[in-house]
Amino acid sequence: MKSLGLKKSKNKKGKNKERRVPIDPSVLTEVSASGSTAAGSYPSKSSGKKAGKAMKKKFNSMAVAAGLKSKKTGSKSGRKERQEHIPGHWAMPEECDEESFMDVDCAASNASVVSHWAQKRGEEAYRAMVEADKLGDVCLTEKAYVLSGLLPDDQALMLTALQQMVDFEREENMLRFRSGSRSRRPKTLPKRPARPGLMKFKSQYSPNGFQADDGSEPSETDTSQDSFKVFGDKMMTRRQNLLTVMQSTCCLSAQESLVAYPNSQLEHVRGQRKFVEVNLPIRNADPIKLPLPLPHVGKEWGFAKLLLTIGPDSLVLALKLLLLERSLFVVGDSVEEVTSVCRALLELLKPFTWMGTIMPSLPFAMLDFVLSPVPFIAGMSVESPDVLGVIESDERTTEAMTSGMSLLNLATGTLLITSEEGLANKLNICPNLRGTLAQIHDRLAHLSENETSALRKFRRFFSRGLSPMESVAVSSATKAIEHYHTNLTADLASSGKGWQRYGQYNTAMGFFEFHPTWFINPRRAELRFQEALAGTQLFLGYVDSRRQQQLNVEELRSSDSAKFLSAWIYFRWTIRKRGQLSM
């Protein structure tokens, strides 16, 4: 049976009134055992006012903990609202009968009675967790576009089209928010006219799904929840229609995909460039016009940023670390630079292919990834320079750098090489490659000083690509690096069947087994021969002849004839350039 406790309270008129609340016997038993009160009544104040207040406070706190009493809020309406939503309040839920209501042991669990509504929500949440567990690992994003079936060389056109769609949706949402604010203004204030020429979704399906806005004001009910849902559904349908159009239009034809850079650098700079143009069904959107071949994020912009940031020496060392399958962690304060540099490192390894893990964008919460024993190329971008210092000094980073990982900081332009034992002796910088990259580095630095250069802004690069002079410099550098890497393979690249000399086919296991010693032994024998050749008089005479040729060239450059010839050529070239500008 339930015991009833009486509580005195005052109404609006100040009169005392009594209300009955269900009291759990276990709570009253504990209070009665203290010897200060009887079952079903409040503590008496005869033993002292202070002791009575303390016992009354304890009684109320225990009743609240057991769900038999609700806390007071700031207002009467707030108390009423809280009483309606707190399970176990004196007003018994309609879904529970008296017997089930009393079966709950509040004193043992120190929790309130669970209502039927809460049980139903809990069951739904549990079923959702079970269904989600069946899916395995799932990546949750607010909004994402997954590109499939596109080659890296052809992604610039699709990414530019997606950027236009994102910009349009952002403007539409902003105008929707502003129009909703205008509809809530007092009617005495004059309303602004809607911006003309914006796109509005057609109620019936059409090939492009868009039409010009008629400039009408939204109704007074446009800010309701239903109208926002309708607006979201229309935006989703319009986005799907636009993506369908992009799939058919944002792709190169067979003839356009065959366009490549000319072999002659002079023809590359002075020749007429070819462009691809795409018009999307977005009102007031500029046509997409990109040069052919399409701009490549990693091979062009990412490589130029990498070379300008860390210099030729650090670039050669970073590539050699990757060739030895050592991990490289790229950090910076720009997500565009970090991800593009990670992509550029993959392109610069040609003719080799990276076999490890690639994570161009890694969140700070996953910094434990640097302890992975598998070789990787990972990037992490942060907004604050202080966080970059925290990453470098983190114990996880320092531990990973002792076991083969190197850190490339794009914000400071530094390369921190791993302290792995014995690795420093294997790293050297080829003088010929370093000289070529140093010249191209100076050339790109000079070109990037121009305010209109695509090397200064990532979005400008996507809108029009590199200039002919910039693309020639980048192409020359990538070809020099690929040529150096190809020479490391000796005759494997020059001969189609060269691989047969350095291995044999295992018939029992059914695969070709490569023997590194068979490849290294001829190289070592050749190196021993070169070491002996360098000590001969014949080789010394060849070195002296090369020195004499260089002295003759420098003497000719400083002669009066050379100075006159260079001044005349520069004068004629200046006149030609002025004539082209005037045309």
Image (cartoon, rainbow, N blue to C red):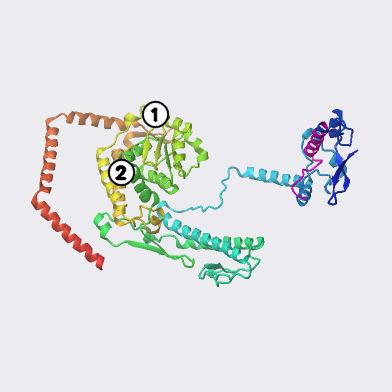
Q: Mark 2 belongs to which amino acid?
A: Ile
Disc 1 on helix, strand or loop?
loop
Residue 248 position, x and y percent, is 47, 62
Please state which of residues 510 and 226 is positioned toward the viewer in this rendering: 226
Say whether residue 339 is left or right of residue 453: right
Residue that appears at 25% across and 46% down: 439
Instruction: Write down the region rendered in magenta.
Output: 51-75
Q: Which residue of the protein is positioned furthest toward the top in this rendering? A: 421
Q: Against 561, is 24 above or below?
A: above
Q: Which residue is mark 2?
A: 481
**Residue 43 visible:** yes
Q: Is 317 inside the magenta-drawn segment?
A: no
Which class describes the residues within 10 Å of circle 1: few (<14), some (14-19), or many (20+)?
some
Which label's residue is closer to the chain start, 1 or 2? 1
Local SS, label 2: helix
27 with respect to 216 (left or right): right
> Which residue bears the numbered disc 1?
420
